[in-house]
Amino acid sequence: MAGRAKPLSPHLQIYRLPLNAILSITHRITGVVLALGAVLVVAYLIAAASGSQAFGAMYSMGAHWLGQIVLFGFTLALYYHMCAGVRHLFWDAGYGYELQTARRTSYAIIVVAVVLTLVTWTVAYTVSGG
């Protein structure tokens, strides 16, 4: 009996999470990202209130390519969290639990978040004269 291998339970390497589960986890992660991003927004506001030199330093960090990636990710997280939150409001009201509806709204959340992010950055780029 000691030589026999015991069966293993399914784990994440072989179990494929449903899309709704992945989106739920991502919704929680984006909530944390937005909380951390709020600290960045406060830092920008403090820099703006501290004078042009402090704001210039913050602005240059945001204008750097790495800062642009962080800001783009923050924008995407904001729109994703908003879209997933709207779906949760419908779920709280008792709508959208059907499997097909849940699947469609999952894809809609992703598409709408990406489109809103791209539109926001396109408009910002156009308005800034970039």
Image (cartoon, rainbow, N blue to C red):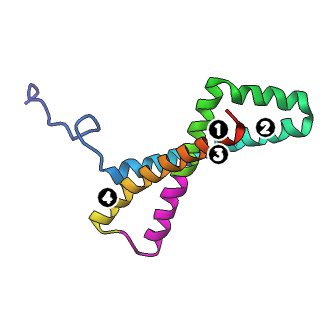
**Given contact means CB atoms under 8 Å apart, are the residues at marks 4 and 2 in contact?**
no
Query: Picture coordinates of residue 38 (x, y %)?
Result: 70, 44
Q: Which residues are magenta?
A: 81-96
Q: Nearer the viewer, residue 28 or 116?
A: 116
Q: Amino acid at mark 2?
A: Ala
User: Which mark is drawn over residue 60?
Assistant: none
Answer with mark 1 or mark 4, whichever residue precedes in sequence: 4
Identify the residue under disc 2.
43
Query: Picture coordinates of residue 116 (x, y %)?
Result: 53, 50
**Given contact means CB atoms under 8 Å apart, are the residues at marks 1 and 4 in contact?**
no
Q: Amino acid at mark 1?
A: Tyr
Around disc 3, counting alpha carbons within 10 Å, would you say few (fewer than 14), some (14 to 19), or many (20 or more)?
few
Answer with mark 1 or mark 3, whichever residue precedes in sequence: 3
User: Which mark is drawn over residue 35?
Assistant: 3
Secondary structure beneath disc 4?
helix
Could you tell me what secondary structure mostly forms the magenta stretch?
helix
Identify the residue under disc 4.
103
Identify the residue under disc 1.
125
Answer with mark 1 or mark 2, whichever residue precedes in sequence: 2
Answer with mark 2 or mark 3, whichever residue precedes in sequence: 3
Q: Is residue 86 above or below residue 61?
A: below
Secondary structure beneath disc 3?
helix
**Given contact means CB atoms under 8 Å apart, are the residues at marks 1 and 2 in contact?**
no
Secondary structure beneath disc 2?
helix
| Distance from Cα at disc 1 to Cα at disc 4 | 33 Å
